[in-house]
Image (cartoon, rainbow, N blue to C red):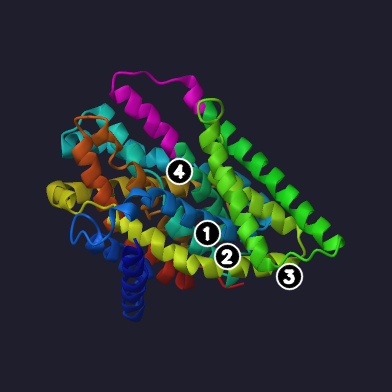
């Protein structure tokens, strides 16, 4: 395991540095590291690491979501309420419609299998999008119109909506039927996640304040450990509650960090944000190298150029969905275009559920996995590059 961790950090950082040097997003180097070191090319990573890959990726995602919560301003979120809610579902629905209409003709799957494929591919990657939006907030790009906050809020809820749709369509493809409660659970999951996180954030702030009043100084480094521990507990509650009630653990983490920021002195929340930013340096490498390691490169050869065409057709539908969400806002065309680009990347959700249809024995399993792998390879670098290069051209610095 130690050898594998050494390779993940050293090779991942080296490849990221090379990419940065040639003006290419760092995550491309990390994804390539994972693909090359992973079980489908060099097989250099220990099985003990690969067996807990999903948990390690989730821990890394939690770190950046805490930083996101500590960077968000509730007043800014109120300004983008309607578009943010629409961004959580409309672009995903439009992309699924794209697959539903074109995948049967291009890839030879049934309409139901096309819906399953669309649900796998429709989620945006918060791991790619959120850190970049935090950077924009910290550097005052587009913050007057709350553009980074809008994208970050939508991306945080988007995957909840898509995973529910995927579960429903996969059940229907196996001969089941859609249940009304599956769709009712979407708003329940979001609301309960926000409330649970807000409660945890309030209790944490109360604990830190009480300790301070009684002259028990809790160092910021210790606060980071405590906040991480509570965040892992919130994620665990989502698993414990499964089957009884739907709760979004990831939204609970963001909500907790938001409340912690509101209830804390600004200098304290700023220092906490900085510390989680430093943790993200290591977490980012783990996350994207392990996402790369989950990519079975052999399936890209089977997919062919038609699958690439299908991905881009679906992205056009997705882009139309983003534009629909922007109707009635004060955003310029350039700013709307930036929102479209920011909603392109796919990685974490596709790496997590891309192989599920194959494991369920669905006839479309192999082609779904092939397209999922291709979508990560194409859209994660494309979206990251677009955000990194486009924000200076398309957004105003405030």
Query: Which residue does the numbered mark 4 point to in the structure image?
Result: 159
Q: Say what secondary structure mark 1 lies in.
A: helix
- The residues tagged by marks 2 and 4 sit, at their Cα atoms, a distance apart of 23 Å
| Residue 118, image quadrant | top left
Disc nearer the start of the sequence (2/3): 3
Distance from Cα at disc 3 to Cα at disc 1: 19 Å
For label 3, the crowd category at 10 Å Cα-Cα, with few meaning under 14, some 14 to 19 and many 20 or more, is few
Does the image show residue 9?
A: yes
Residue 171: within the magenta? yes
The magenta segment: 162-183
At a point 73% along the width and 70% down the height, the residue shown is: 267
Q: Residue at x 34, y 48 (%)?
A: 51
Q: Secondary structure at mark 2?
A: helix
Label 2 belongs to which residue?
A: 276
Q: Nearer the viewer, residue 115 or 44?
A: 44
Image quadrant of residue 167? Answer: top left
CA–CA distance in space, label 2 to label 3: 14 Å
Q: Quadrant of the N terminus?
A: bottom left
Mark 2: few/some/many CA within 10 Å (<14, 14-19, 20+) = many
Q: Is residue 259 left or right of residue 372?
A: right
Residue 64, disc? 1
In three-dimensional space, the C-alpha distance between marks 4 and 1, rounded to whole angstroms, equals: 16 Å
CB atoms of marks 2 and 1 within 8 Å? yes
């Amino acid at each position: 395991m130690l050898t594998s961790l050494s390779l993940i950090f050293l090779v991942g950082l080296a490849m990221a540095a090379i990419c940065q040097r040639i003006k290419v997003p760092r995550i491309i180097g990390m994804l390539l590291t994972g693909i090359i070191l992973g079980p489908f090319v060099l097989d250099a990573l220990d099985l003990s690491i690969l067996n807990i890959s999903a948990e390690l990726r989730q821990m890394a995602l939690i770190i950046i979501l805490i930083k996101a919560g500590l960077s968000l301003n509730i007043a800014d979120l109120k300004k983008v309420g309607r578009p943010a809610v629409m961004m959580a579902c409309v672009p995903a629905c439009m992309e699924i419609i794209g697959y539903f209409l074109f995948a049967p003709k291009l890839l030879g799957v049934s309409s139901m299998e096309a819906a399953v494929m669309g649900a796998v591919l429709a989620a945006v990657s918060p791991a790619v999008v959120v850190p970049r939006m935090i950077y924009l907030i910290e550097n005052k790009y587009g913050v007057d119109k709350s553009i980074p906050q809008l994208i970050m809020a939508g991306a945080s809820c988007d995957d909840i909506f898509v995973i529910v749709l995927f579960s429903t369509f996969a059940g229907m493809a196996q001969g089941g039927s859609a249940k009304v409660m599956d769709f009712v659970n979407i708003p329940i999951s979001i609301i309960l996640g926000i409330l649970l996180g807000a409660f945890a954030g309030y209790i944490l702030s109360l604990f830190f304040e009480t300790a301070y009043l009684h002259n028990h100084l809790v160092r910021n480094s210790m606060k980071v450990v405590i906040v991480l521990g509570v965040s892992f507990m919130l994620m665990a509650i989502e698993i414990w509650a499964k089957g009884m009630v739907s709760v979004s653990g990831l939204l609970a983490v963001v909500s907790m960090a938001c409340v912690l920021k509101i209830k804390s002195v600004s200098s304290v929340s700023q220092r906490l944000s900085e510390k989680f930013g430093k943790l993200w340096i290591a977490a980012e490498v783990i996350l994207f190298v392990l996402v790369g390691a989950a990519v079975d490169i052999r399936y890209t050869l089977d997919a062919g150029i038609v699958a690439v065409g299908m991905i881009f057709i679906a992205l056009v539908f997705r882009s139309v969905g983003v534009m629909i969400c922007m109707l009635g806002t004060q955003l310029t065309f350039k700013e709307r275009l930036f929102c479209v680009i920011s909603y392109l990347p796919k990685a974490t959700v596709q790496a997590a559920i891309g192989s599920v249809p194959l494991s369920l024995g669905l006839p479309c399993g192999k082609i779904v996995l092939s397209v999922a792998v291709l979508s990560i390879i194409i859209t994660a670098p494309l979206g990251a590059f677009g955000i990194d290069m486009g924000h200076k051209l398309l957004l105003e610095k405030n």
